[in-house]
Amino acid sequence: MKTYCFANKKGGCSKTTLNIETAFYLALQGKKTIIIDGDPQGNATERFNLENFDNELVDVLQGNCYAKEAIIKTAEYLDIIPTNKYNSKYRDFADMMIHKEPHIFSELVEVLSGMDYNYCFIDINPSDSNLERSILGAVDEIISPVQPQAFSFTGVDSFIDFVESIKKQFRKNIQFNKIVISMLDNRIAGHNVMKEKLESLPNYKTFLFHDCADISNSQIVSKSVFEFAPQSRSTEEIKSIAESLR
Ligand SMILES: Nc1ncnc2c1ncn2[C@@H]1O[C@H](COP(=O)(O)OP(=O)(O)OP(=O)(O)O)[C@@H](O)[C@H]1O
Ligand SMILES: [Mg+2]
């Protein structure tokens, strides 16, 4: 099993959208895939319209249930370990406990890798607390969505430093050499300028994820863009990102 996370310390840059849609695409290819909703905001869980579940991620982390007891099937080959945004247990756990157990997500990934999954995606909060450290320390590869806006570079630099410090903490070679230029609108001159700057970053391969109404519209009706608008430009873009991970 390979574990991935679309991550950035910045909010609203398509992390959840890309974690879910890339997972969805791989599941459509018949690859057994699981999403862990590691963000206390519970957006990934909400996106699948899940509300009533007995167990959630925090119950697994606290040892109140086994991982398999919290897994929900959302589509053929696509499962999720949910997080309830109305339940503060996970947030409290992250605030109070996780610094004592930094390897807790690595342990969970280890358990899931024994359950015949091909891919795991962990959705993450736009923050740099011990929770995000524990999550990123558990993955094989980080891909960072970056919006082509002013100050993006400062954000990229500081995220690169953050990842470097996690690699040292976990003594692990986590791959991080892909950036997704997200919500790109070519009609905006500044976006094109920033796009070129991001594309000229040495050591990073870049992918495009244009601003596209099909993404917002599909999420409003709780569907993947692959179901809602299979011919959309977004599906081609997500496919190319996902294929680079295989
Ligand atoms: N390519 C896109 N085209 C149009 N809208 C998009 C695109 N990507 C994301 N969005 C929209 O932007 C908003 C933020 O996206 P998303 O929730 O994926 O970001 P995020 O980085 O996970 O945010 P957060 O930091 O709050 O977790 C959502 O309303 C989503 O529908
Ligand atoms: Mg999110």
Image: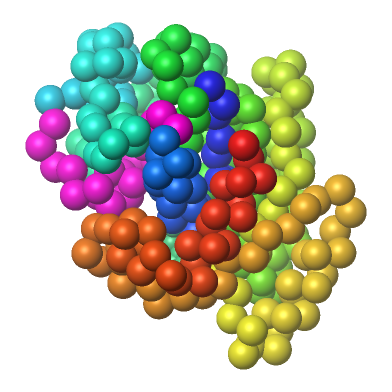
Say if residue 36 shows up in the picture.
Answer: no
**Nearer to me, 80 or 15:** 80
Q: Is residue 128 above or below residue 226?
A: above
**Nearer to me, 193 or 11:** 193
x, y (%) of residue 112?
42, 17
x, y (%) of residue 12?
48, 61
Q: Is residue 113 above or below residue 191?
A: above
Which residue does the image show at 57% across and 26% down from the upper left?
Answer: 2
Say if residue 117 shows up in the picture.
Answer: yes
Count of residue discs? 0
**Nearer to me, 134 or 120:** 120
x, y (%) of residue 56?
24, 27
Q: Along the horizontal axis of the image, is 155 left or right of 21?
A: right
Q: Is residue 193 above or below residue 160?
A: below
Q: Along the horizontal axis of the image, is 178 left or right of 218?
A: right
x, y (%) of residue 93?
35, 24
Range shown magenta = 31-53
Which residue does the image show at 27% across and 40% down from the upper left?
Answer: 75
User: Could you tell me which quadrant the C terminus lies in?
Assistant: top right
Q: How is the image coloured?
A: rainbow
Q: Along the horizontal axis of the image, is 116 left or right of 206?
A: left
Q: Is residue 7 above or below residue 77?
A: below
92 is within the stretch colored magenta = no
39 is within the stretch colored magenta = yes
Which residue does the image show at 55% across and 39% down from the upper left?
Answer: 5
